[in-house]
Image: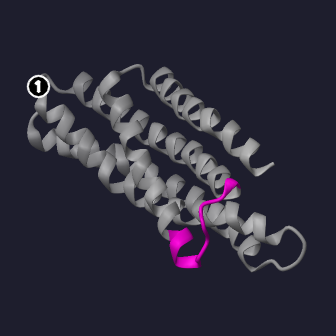
């Protein structure tokens, strides 16, 4: 059964990652922003692997399921951050005849600031909902813990990435235009 499940995952995982890439592009409609969002996902995964290492979990099918769920959440929050940054930039363009470095910094800060509370609320609510699983005992708790562990670690790194790195990269991308 394990080998059959691993064989199934060998095409489900790449297909899932490809689907996430396509969905990111459909949401953002810009190749540069799509790549920015997509290339942040390995850092969310890194947080999942670190948490699994800290807690002593081996990579298992349950862990892979947790990592895939994490990818979806991290992609969604990154997309929303980029949409807010894009909107702030468009608003600044419509007001100003030309955009200075200071006005660009201001618009990126404004767009990112609008997402701080919602991103923190999302991360904290997911982490809070996963914590009881980590303390659960009984039938099936080991599998649930293996799913929850990568999501916990990934939500921490994803929150940091979404709140700090994406706005900086967005700023640098616009600056190079």
Q: Is residue 111 left or right of residue 100?
A: right
Q: Position of residue 136 (x, y in %)?
A: 80, 77
Figure check: 47 above or below 77: below
Secondary structure type for disc 1: loop
Figure check: 17 above or below 116: above
Q: Position of residue 3 (x, y in %)?
A: 72, 47
Residue 58, quarter of the rendered image: bottom right
Q: Residues within 10 Å of mark 1 (few under 14, many from 20)?
A: few
Q: Position of residue 156 (x, y in %)?
A: 49, 64
Residue at the spot 75% in from the left edge and 80% down from the top edge: 135
Q: Nearer the viewer, residue 99 or 126?
A: 126
Figure check: 114 above or below 124: above
The residue pinned by badge 1 equals 98
In the picture, the quarter occupied by the C terminus is top left
Figure check: 73 above or below 128: above
Residue 45 in the magenta stretch? The answer is no
| Colouring rule applied to residues | one colour
Q: Is residue 26 left or right of residue 150?
A: left
Residue at the spot 20% in from the left edge and 34% down from the top edge: 173
Q: Position of residue 88 (x, y in %)?
A: 33, 35
Magenta range is 51-61
Residue 92, quarter of the rendered image: top left
């Amino acid at each position: 059964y394990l080998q059959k499940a691993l064989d199934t995952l060998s095409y489900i995982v790449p297909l899932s990652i490809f689907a996430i890439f396509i969905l990111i592009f459909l949401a953002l409609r810009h190749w540069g922003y799509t790549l920015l969002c997509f290339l942040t996902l390995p850092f969310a995964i890194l947080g999942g692997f670190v948490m699994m290492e800290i807690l002593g979990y081996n990579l298992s099918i349950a862990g892979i399921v947790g990592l895939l769920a994490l990818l979806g959440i991290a992609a969604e929050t990154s997309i929303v951050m980029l949409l807010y940054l894009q909107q702030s930039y468009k608003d600044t363009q419509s007001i100003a005849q030309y955009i200075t470095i200071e006005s660009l910094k201001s618009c990126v800060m404004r767009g990112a600031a609008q997402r701080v509370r919602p991103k923190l609320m999302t991360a904290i609510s997911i982490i809070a909902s996963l914590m009881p699983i980590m303390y659960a005992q009984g039938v099936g708790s080991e599998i649930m813990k293996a799913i929850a562990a990568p999501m916990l670690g990934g939500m921490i790194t994803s929150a940091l990435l979404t709140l700090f790195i994406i706005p900086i990269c967005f700023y640098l991308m616009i600056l190079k235009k």
